[in-house]
Image (cartoon, rainbow, N blue to C red):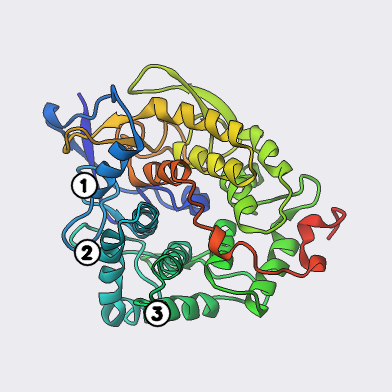
Amino acid sequence: MKSKFLMLLVPVFSLVSCMEDVTTIYEQPIPLVEVVDIPVENTNTPAQSSSPEQVYEWMAHMQADNGLVESAEDTNFVSLYDNALAALAFLADGDIPRAEMIFDYFNQQLETEFYGNNGGFFQFREISGENGSRIWMGDNAWLLLAINNYHETTNSYKYEQLAFELENWLRSLQEEDGGLKGGINEDGTLIPKVTEGIITAYNAVPGFDDFHMGILQFLEEQRWDVNEEVLITQTPNPAYNYALDLYSLGYMILEDFPVEVLTKANRFLNSQTSTTHGNVISGYCFDDDKDVVWLEGTAQMAMAYNAAAQTSNAENIVLNIEETFINSATNEGAIGIPYTTNHGTNFGATYLWDHTDITPTISSSAWYLFVKQSFNPFQLEKNKGIPAEDKFWRNSGVN
């Protein structure tokens, strides 16, 4: 029987990806998941027709009156990262009011939540906004990135104070080695430095100054594989040093990054049978175990290929993604994209949550829309004018 899941807001789990933040999950306790029966009429089914407009309609339908966007149908689960992605997708479509609804929500939480936490918004919460948990640096960087794009798009600085507070908090997380603290788990333990979150913050904080130089120094000294010439996670388990998103995002964020990194990402290529459709889909896994096609990460690779002007590669990836569309169970005519094609492991050895392969998710759907709209969320702060001698990825391969 098909069943839905209700995620208990625990600090170790994200319904949708915070990208390389998932590298920390396999080191954490297994999250609590309550599985209950779902009515037959609410079962998601394979989509018979597809268009970006239908995906956008589904995303808009997932927005509540308070502005927050639910990460997937029937979950009561909200991710800060997903809301930043949704705001960017609304901006790319020219739907400014919907983007403002998201920013308004967080702007209204500055006094109580942000200052109450001594900086940082919660990573997870319910759709009502209640029961927030875990403060993760990377998701807050994504919110700042989205606000920066809003200001650029609208030529308005409506959320200048919100952006100012986020930027200052991100800067305050930098340590002597140049890396950024990852944040705080619900139990008070520290989240370790996460490469993906750090490069996102590098892009989100405008300009280029000592903050950015410190990050580059940290990446060169601690997160650069001089043999493979790629960014790494530097997890305690070396089997998971290589993560797909560091290939795609690394290329999109760091200027003059070698385009060869996109070909190197072929190490994650695999084909899996779609749970909902029964057809074979080719795409990219989170890591080297290649047991799933991660559709969010696969769409990120399509965006990276577009950024590299390799449109034929991007189009081939998109064709595979479009074979995974699922009908909305709550909004007739709308469709979305699941997180993965099939069930398997997340980054690392921990298994993905139930229904990751049969329920549409904001993250995969948003990145698909970015590709279709030719909207690169990193482009605004891509060219920071890094001195040539500091582009370690262009050096001879030695630290």
User: Residue at horizontal 75%, vertical 63%?
Assistant: 221
Q: CA distance from mark 2 to mark 1?
A: 17 Å
Query: Which residue is identified by label 2?
Result: 129
Q: Are marks 3 and 2 in contact (CB under 8 Å)?
A: no
- Residue at 38% across, 68% down: 154
Q: Secondary structure at mark 3?
A: helix
Which quadrant holds residue 4? top left
17 and 387: which is toward the camera:
387
Identify the residue position indicated by label 3 in the image: 160
Q: Position of residue 21 (x, y in %)?
A: 49, 54
Q: Is residue 145 left or right of residue 161?
A: right
Q: Which mark is residue 159?
A: none
Mark 3: which amino acid? Glu
Residue count near mark 3 (Cα–Cα under 10 Å), binned few <14, some 14–19, many ≥20: some
Which element carries disc 2, helix, strand or loop? loop
Report x, y in % for residue 165: 42, 80
Q: Is residue 235 visible?
A: no
Say which residue appears at 59% left-offset and 58% top-offset.
Answer: 195
Viewer-nearest of labels 2 and 1?
1
Where residue 346 sits in the image (x, y, percent)? Answer: 47, 40
* Quarter of image, res 340: top left
Callout 1: helix, strand or loop? helix
- Give the labeled residue for mark 1: 61
Residue type at mark 1 is His
Question: How far across and how far down the image is residue 182, in percent?
Answer: 51, 66
Q: Residues within 10 Å of mark 2 (few under 14, many from 20)?
A: some
Q: Is residue 224 visible?
A: yes
Task: Give the spatial CA distance, label 3 vs label 2.
Answer: 23 Å
Residues 316 and 396: in front is 316
